[in-house]
Image: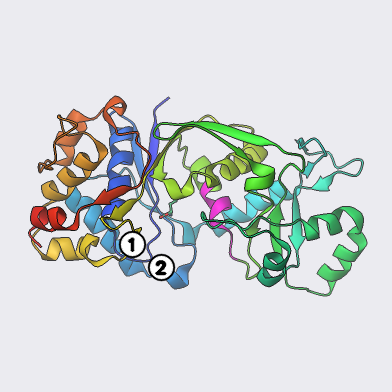
Amino acid sequence: MQTVGRFAPSPSGRMHLGNVLCALLAWLSARHQNGAFLLRIEDLDAMRCPRSYADLIMDDLQWLGLDWDGAPVYQSARHPLYEDALRTLQRLTIDDSGAVTADATGNATPLIYPCFCSRADIRAASAPQEGDRFMIYPGTCRRLAETNPDEVRARLAQGRRHSLRIAMPASNSTIAFEDRVFGHQEFNVTREIGDSVVRRADGLFSYQLVVVVDDLAMGVDDIVRGRDLLRSNTLQIWIRQALTGSTDYSYAHLPLIDNASGQRLAKREKSLDMGILRKHGATPERVIGYCAWLLGLQGDPHSTHPQPMSAQEALTEFSWAKVRTDTADRSLDPQAFNTYFGL
Ligand code: GLU
């Protein structure tokens, strides 16, 4: 079976160097196995994702020499697919042991249940959570669905505003996977993920659901992206298991890029923005060379100076064995960066 990789940018801005780093590694991973490489524009939240940014991302990828197969997939055009997947999940139940089945006998909990809580309710009832955009849901409406389904039906009949959540196993349950950069990963999905929104109260499907549906529909099995999605990966495995029972993917999550003072670079940190780099005369080889150097693909692992190289040259150099697996976020020295790019 041919490997299928993908790059799935959210077009809420121009690409910056961190996005290019992920795109390059995803492309290298797929292409060095003669695999397909697909492009998915994650523009589900159309208000935040004007078409012009998607066009700029594609222009930058072409300019860099990172080609993809077939037409780009736009999430904004795929609502019926997400509706179907949601309906499939809505036919399932989860029992006390965390087993997900299609037969609704006994008093199993629906796998997907309506949640009437506001963010403020959830915040008030939860212990504070650090990082990764996770706020562990305390289970209020899950208990309601289990103990008082009539009340749930009544609220729905009244048209009460609600999101939809997917239930996680209620007793401490872990999901593990091997990551090519971060190694063995294991998360307690009960405590570290919790029941998660799959459709927001405003009707928008959640990233966590659609990414699974799209990767399945597109035949993707090679996932390379930023480490901010490392923990989310277990939620995505959980959703995929519920939809298909299959989990057989390869994963690599990449450390993020920091500036020298250790602050995570925001998406539009000026000097790392592709628009700025190109305007100042950066060549594709300079950008790819810098990213290949960050990844550890440039010969001498102790070399302190990136060398320009094309995407094709990086492909010749590429092997997973060379890719740096230190998991600290990459700290860039702004002065060396500016000198290299002539800024
Ligand atoms: N669209 C997400 C982002 O730009 C990445 C999604 C993914 O690779 O799964 O952060």
- Label 2 Cα crowd, 10 Å radius (few <14 / some 14-19 / many 20+): some
The residue sitting at 80% across, 55% down in the picture is 142
The answer to whether the residue bearing label 1 lies less than 8 angstroms from the nearest atom of ligand 1 is: no
Residue 207 belongs to the span the image colors magenta: yes
User: Disc 2 designates what residue?
Assistant: 49
The answer to whether the residue bearing label 2 lies less than 8 angstroms from the nearest atom of ligand 1 is: no
* Residue 19 in the image: above or below residue 114: above
Amino acid type of the residue tagged 1 in the rendering: Ala
Report x, y in % for residue 92: 76, 44
* Residue 25 in the image: above or below residue 338: above
User: Disc 1 designates what residue?
Assistant: 54
Q: Main secondary structure of the magenta part?
A: helix
Q: Is residue 106 left or right of residue 122?
A: right
Q: Earlier in the sequence, mark 1 or mark 2?
A: 2
The residue sitting at 66% across, 55% down in the picture is 136
The residue sitting at 67% across, 46% down in the picture is 191
Report x, y in % for residue 15: 29, 59
The residue sitting at 57% across, 41% down in the picture is 234
Q: Toward which corner of the image does residue 318 lie, by quadrant?
A: top left
Q: Is residue 61 visible?
A: yes
Q: In the rendered structure, which segment of residues is drawn in magenta? A: 204-211
Q: Is residue 65 visible?
A: no
- In what quadrant of the picture does the N terminus appear? top left
For this rendering, which residue is in front, 90 or 297? Answer: 297
Report x, y in % for residue 309: 11, 40
Residues at marks 1 and 2 touching, judged by CB atoms closer than 8 Å: yes
